[in-house]
């Protein structure tokens, strides 16, 4: 049989059909459609469907074009048919428009690759049915049809909103992932930076402890080195969580502290800066101790920030006064200056981040405006408060820190002895930093131990194979064989059960400790390692290593 004449079948179909291309231009129309719309083929073909059938301009509520455009757009977007609700869509009739009601369905025609080549717009003229009022519920039918059309319109709006919401959620998810990756990159950077800083700090810390064995106790230069090295170590710790200082999550090591000693030590530390800036620093300390329960380094940081802040906002020849007193049972620390002062209205805002009381025309003040924010954080962590006072520009400024007193039941922290009361031990130090390795060896030998140094992982393993040791101090970030691999190797060989392995590393996150223990290390000490920390670990193993 010969194939049917599809053009003839299309024209002979009793249902009105109109064919559109993806640009919504009419490319074909059957006779039933021409009859239903009282149009001719030559007029329609080649026109946009909306140019051929515009809304009735006399009907302000006309929504035929809008709803039909939405339906066709949905078909193009989804590749699926879309049935519209009963729709009033008036058609041109000479110089006016004729009211018509339609039941439309829009269907895509897909190519083999799934792309849309055409759309079939099929309609059914239901005008007579709507107008006739046939049946007892004809009026209700019209209202139902109008309600159905409205529901379809609302549903389409909801669908459009859902599509936009889905796109917004996808964009938000992508942005969130980008932010998380930035956070991970920041954490990796800070961890690496902390590790790199800890290596030289570890050598400095060991050198300070070595000096302490030779320099007379109480030497002022040694005291400054010890305090400032401790401060650098604590600040490096904070790099692992850069936001702790501004979110109240700084860790405190509380002990019974005399504020007078904090003031005296801090004044000694900043004396050179005040001298070079030609400012005077005056102290007013009471004869009796003013005891608080606090972190010595953090309290020194608090006071240092206040006096350096005063230094910035005073002119040469000015005086900064620091006083300590008790008031209503609390400890009171006051820093006064005769500098530029500030408007009393901004007193509270001075403790916000990135805030500086710089008057117009003054541009010489350095810093990011974080110092006073950190002062407030440290004060609040100690259960205290800090306030700022000034009578106005040019009248100087006063900062008051109020701290609760130390409980009377609290006792001073005992100081650990620098010399261990244990037998001499045989140490192997595996460390690629030559300064640090040499200082560790000198420190251990000065305390009566023997120490062998290996600057690579391979040399360390060779040393263990060649001679007996009691304790191995092993860096994790070695250039050839990592410390974790060394531990696994030693624990996998017989004859090393007695050997105590201590990881010494600049990576100090919880995951680093867990990996070290899993690899076979008996203990984990962060750099800079102090002799006190080492002795505390060794004291737990006294019976095993003696």
Image (spheres, rainbow, N blue to C red):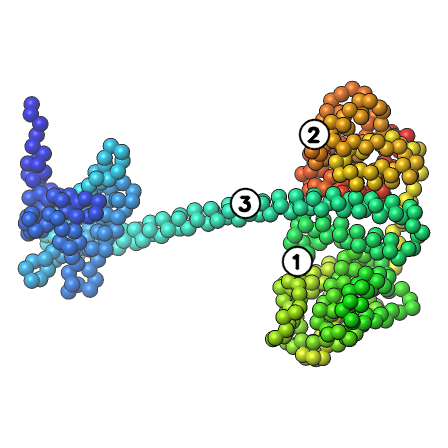
Tell me what residue is drawn at x 20 percent, y 64 percent.
60
Location of the C terminus by quadrant is: top right
Q: Which residue was labeled with disc 3?
A: 181
Of badges 3 and 2, nearer the viewer stands: 2
Circle 3/circle 2 CB separation < 8 Å = no
Mark 2 neighbour density, 10 Å: few (under 14) some (14–19) many (20 or more): some
Q: Secondary structure at mark 3?
A: helix
178 sits left or right of 322 in the view: left
Of badges 1 and 2, nearer the viewer stands: 2
Quarter of the image for residue 417 reads top right
Instruction: First in sequence, mark 3 or 2: give its number.
Output: 3
Q: Which residue was labeled with disc 1?
A: 246
Where is residue 369 drawn, in percent x and y?
Answer: 65, 64
Is there any visible trace of residue 275 in the rendered image?
A: yes
Along the line of sight, the residue nearer the viewer: 222 or 30:
222
Residue 26 drawn above or below residue 333: above
């Amino acid at each position: 049989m010969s194939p049917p004449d599809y053009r003839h079948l299309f024209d002979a179909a009793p249902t009105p059909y109109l064919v559109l291309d993806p640009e919504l231009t009419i490319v074909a129309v059957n006779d039933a459609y021409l009859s239903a719309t009282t149009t001719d083929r030559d007029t329609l073909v080649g026109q946009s469907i909306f140019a051929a059938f515009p809304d009735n301009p006399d009907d302000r509520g006309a929504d035929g074009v809008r709803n039909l455009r939405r339906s066709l757009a949905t078909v193009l977007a989804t590749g699926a048919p879309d049935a519209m609700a009963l729709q009033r869509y008036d058609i041109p009739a000479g110089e006016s428009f004729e009211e018509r009601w339609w039941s439309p369905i829009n269907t895509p025609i897909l190519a083999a690759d799934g792309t849309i080549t055409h759309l079939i717009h099929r309609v059914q003229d239901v005008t007579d049915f709507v107008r006739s009022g046939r049946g007892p519920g004809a009026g209700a039918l019209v209202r139902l049809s109008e309600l159905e059309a409205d529901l379809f319109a609302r549903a389409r709006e909801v669908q459009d909103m859902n599509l936009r919401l889905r796109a917004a959620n996808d964009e938000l998810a992508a942005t969130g992932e980008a932010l998380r990756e930035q956070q991970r990159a920041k954490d990796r950077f800070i961890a690496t930076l902390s590790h790199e800083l800890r290596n030289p700090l570890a050598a400095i810390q060991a050198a300070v402890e070595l000096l302490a064995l030779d320099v007379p106790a109480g030497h002022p230069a040694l005291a400054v080195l010890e305090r400032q090295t401790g401060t650098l170590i604590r600040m490096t710790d904070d790099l692992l969580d850069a936001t702790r200082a501004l979110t109240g999550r700084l860790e405190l090591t509380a002990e019974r502290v005399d504020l007078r000693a904090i003031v005296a030590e801090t004044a000694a530390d900043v004396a050179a800066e005040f001298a070079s800036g030609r400012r005077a620093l005056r102290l007013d300390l009471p004869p009796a101790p003013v005891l608080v329960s606090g972190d010595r380094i953090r309290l020194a940081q608090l006071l240092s920030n206040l006096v350096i802040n005063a230094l910035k906002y005073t002119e040469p020849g000015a005086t900064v006064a620091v006083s300590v007193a008790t008031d209503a049972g609390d400890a009171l620390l006051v820093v006064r200056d005769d500098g530029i002062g500030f408007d009393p209205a901004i007193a509270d805002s001075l403790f916000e981040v990135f805030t500086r009381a710089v008057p117009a025309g003054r541009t010489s003040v350095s810093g990011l405006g974080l110092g006073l924010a950190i002062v407030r954080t440290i004060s609040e962590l100690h259960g205290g408060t800090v306030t700022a006072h000034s009578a106005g520009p040019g009248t100087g400024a006063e900062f008051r820190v109020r701290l609760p007193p130390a409980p009377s039941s609290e006792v001073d922290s005992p100081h650990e002895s620098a010399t261990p009361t244990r037998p001499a031990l045989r140490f192997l130090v595996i460390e690629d930093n030559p300064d640090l390795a040499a200082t560790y060896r000198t420190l251990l030998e000065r305390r009566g131990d023997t120490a062998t140094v290996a600057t690579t992982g391979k040399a360390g393993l060779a040393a263990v194979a060649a001679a007996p040791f009691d304790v191995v101090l092993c860096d994790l970030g070695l250039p050839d064989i990592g410390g974790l691999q060394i531990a696994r190797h030693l624990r996998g060989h017989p004859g090393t059960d007695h050997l105590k392995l201590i990881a010494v590393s600049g990576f100090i996150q919880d995951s680093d400790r867990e990996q070290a223990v899993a690899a076979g290390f008996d203990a984990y000490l962060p750099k800079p390692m102090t002799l006190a920390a080492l002795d505390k670990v060794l004291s737990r193993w006294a019976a095993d290593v003696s």
